[in-house]
Image (cartoon, rainbow, N blue to C red):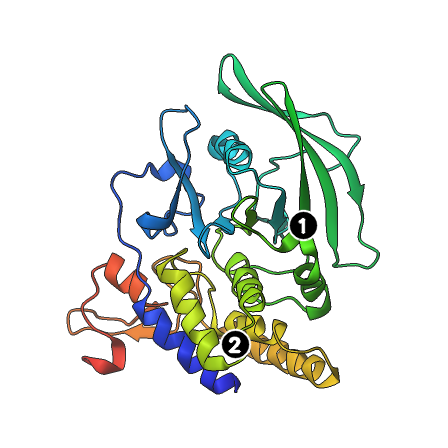
Amino acid sequence: MNGVLARCFYALDERASIDPDPDVPDRLNRYSGFPAQPKHTRYENHSGLGHTYINANWVDGKRYIATQAPIPDTMADFWWMVIQAQVKCVIMLTDFAEGSNKKADPYFPTDPQDPEMGFELSPDNHIRVRCSSLTRAKHPGSFLHRELEILYGGRRSIVEHLQYLDWPDGRVPANPHEVRSMLQMKVSQGDRHHPVVVHCSAGVGRAGTFLLARVALDRGIQTAAEFCKLLDELRQNGRMILVQTATQFIFAWKLTQSHDASSVQQHLALIAEEHRDDSRLLCEMCQLRPATYRFRHRAQDTPISYCGSHCQKRHQLRCMGSLCCQ
């Protein structure tokens, strides 16, 4: 089954492409290679800050919003989106840093003892965010459950904030039970009146993996064929490049299956397989995704490693490795 899913993922990855958008200020994207596409599902953020763009897309109609971890220039936009869309839950699938690499900026007070944070929409228009409660993990690697108090325009709302700390960028977590527990929480299920915001760092890999599993569970998808079609749908009519690697795609599938001892062993095998792939190069174009293709055109002296058609198209590469000049 893993081989079938992997082949499906790579076939879908070749269809996924990101086109340059000159109208989008790059300063509003955490990573220049991952703008909010496709355009027709992009969230329109009318915050009054001089732009409507925010790196966020509607997913599965308007039940979920996939977005990047807010950067300093977009934190006010992020919280205005939460208010405007009447969001009741934000799911954060990254720590603030992995080693020396920053993955997210603090956009909320992390502890009830921390002072509130303020975000300016205009000189007379501010959003204030407080942390009213924090439930810490019982075991290392578990998620943190916070209640955030949002104050704006004389109104007060509560947003539940779930943060999972032990999911490395570009990988799958070592413990599938904790992610499955998050999926089983009622608050993680979005609806059109109160969509759930899901983000990691770029808002495509870990966020996409979680959303793929979440929507598959919502729809009761049972077969691998339906699951493959779902990823294609969520990319074309949700957020492009959702799910970064074949391993994450397989992990999302396993999250939707019944939990038993064999599923645990399968997950451990998946982790081992992923670690064997550590030697793989990163894409030389975006420096984020594992390279799955080698490009050697007659005009190139040395091969270039790239991750898929979105980078091939973006950098105007003209051949497809073994399908061309090698």
Mark number displayed over residue 163: 1
Mark toward the start of the polypeptide (2 vs 1)? 1
Asked which secondary structure carries label 2, the reply is helix
Disc number lying in front (2 or 1): 1
Is residue 175 at least partly visible in the picture?
Answer: no
301 lies above or below 143: below
Q: How many marks?
A: 2
Mark number displayed over residue 135: none
Please name the residue that numbered disc 2 is placed on. 277
**In which quarter of the view is residue 44 placed?**
top left
Mark 2 and mark 1: Cα distance apart in space: 27 Å
**In which quarter of the view is residue 292 placed?**
bottom left
Asked which secondary structure carries label 1, the reply is strand
Outermost residue to the front:
193
Q: Report the residue at 38% width, 46% height from top.
A: 42
Which percent across, then down, holds residue 235? 39, 61
Front residue of this view, candidates 252 and 285: 252
**Cβ–Cβ below 8 Å for labels 2 and 1?**
no
Q: Could you tell whether 253 is left or right of 307 in the image? A: right
Residue type, label 1: Gln
Q: Could you tell whether 94 is left or right of 143 in the image? A: left
Outermost residue to the right:
138
Q: Could you tell whether 39 is left or right of 148 in the image? A: left
Q: Report the residue at 78% width, 33% height from top.
A: 112
Is residue 233 at least partly visible in the picture?
Answer: yes
Front residue of this view, candidates 232 and 69: 232
137 lies above or below 146: below
Q: Report the residue at 56% width, 37% height from top.
A: 86
Front residue of this view, candidates 262 and 228: 228
Report the quarter where the C terminus lies. Answer: bottom left
Q: Report the residue at 60% width, 79% height from top.
A: 270
